[in-house]
Amino acid sequence: MHTISDDLGAAVPLPRPVTSVVSLVPSLTEAIAASRPELLIGATDWCSQPPELEVSRVRGTKNPDLTRIAELRPDLVICNQEENRELDVRRLPPLRTVVPIWRDPWMVVGARTFTGDLLARLGLRNAYARGADRYPHVQLPELLAVRPELVLLPDEPYEFSAEDGPEAFAGLRTELVSGRLLTWYGPSLATARTELEAAVTR
């Protein structure tokens, strides 16, 4: 994980080197096209400069095509407060997430599960949501090969801890979370969203 500072001094965490950018700000699209054109893969319909710009178009600054942006899988999406809506920024490409629930053998949250639905409601993208199994067994190399941007390690059913779990994902962002927040339905949901969002945005 690498962190840079934007022009206002805010920290911008980058899980990997930036090799592709979608810009939702016409003036910044022009700046990127002038300075690092090879990075630019998408821009709004209003991004008219330079005239020869040939990238995927993602609609307007106030109504970006979030599905198309997700399909492009950019490393970075450029927005600003004046041009773009906070709601759209929050809905932009979600973090590719894996949730191991056991190790030796490794098992993860898959498709059609309560936890998977919870991840989607948090704006996270379960890397195993499209598989056939609800809780697939995976080998660690396969788990790393999906290039997760976030690994959530719950304390149940397997009790992941600071000493048992994160070391398997060296170089990746890991967060230890309460399994109750991810797998229990009932009173725990009253605070689950707030607590999980705090962990995700740390």
Image: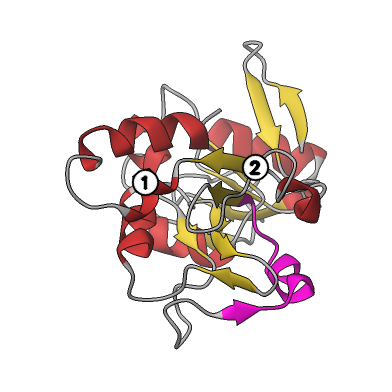
Cα–Cα gap, marks 2 and 1: 15 Å
- Determine whether, in the image, residue 130 is placed left or right of residue 95: left
Residue 60 appears in the picture as rendered: no
Looking at the image, residue 85 lies above or below residue 51: above
Find numbered disc 2 in the image and state the secondary structure of the residue it sits on.
loop
Image quadrant containing the C terminus = top right
Callout 2–callout 1 Cβ contact below 8 Å: no
- Residue drawn where x is 65% and y is 78% of the image: 138
Observer-nearest of 69 and 173: 173
Task: Out of 11 and 192, give the one closest to the viewer.
Answer: 192
Residue 141 percent coordinates (x, y): 79, 73
Please state which amino acid type lies under the numbered disc 2.
Ser
Q: Position of residue 157 (x, y in %)?
A: 48, 58
Picture coordinates of residue 160 (x, y %)?
61, 49
| Relative horizontal placement of residue 162, taking residue 135 as reference (left or right) | right
Q: Is residue 77 above or below residue 131?
A: above
The amino acid sitting under disc 1 is Arg
Report the residue marked by disc 2.
Answer: 161
Q: Is residue 194 above or below residue 136?
A: above
- Residue 9 magenta-drawn? no
Is residue 148 shown in magenta? yes
Of the two numbered discs 2 and 1 on the same chain, state the one appearing first in sequence: 2
What residue would you read off at disc 1? 180
Q: In the rendered image, which quarter is residue 183 located in?
A: bottom left
Tell me the residue at 75%/28% (across/down).
Answer: 3
Residue 24 visible, this angle: yes
Q: What number is the disc on residue 170?
A: none
Residue at 49%, 27% (x, y): give it.
Answer: 80
The span shown in magenta is 137-150
Helix, strand or loop for disc 1: helix
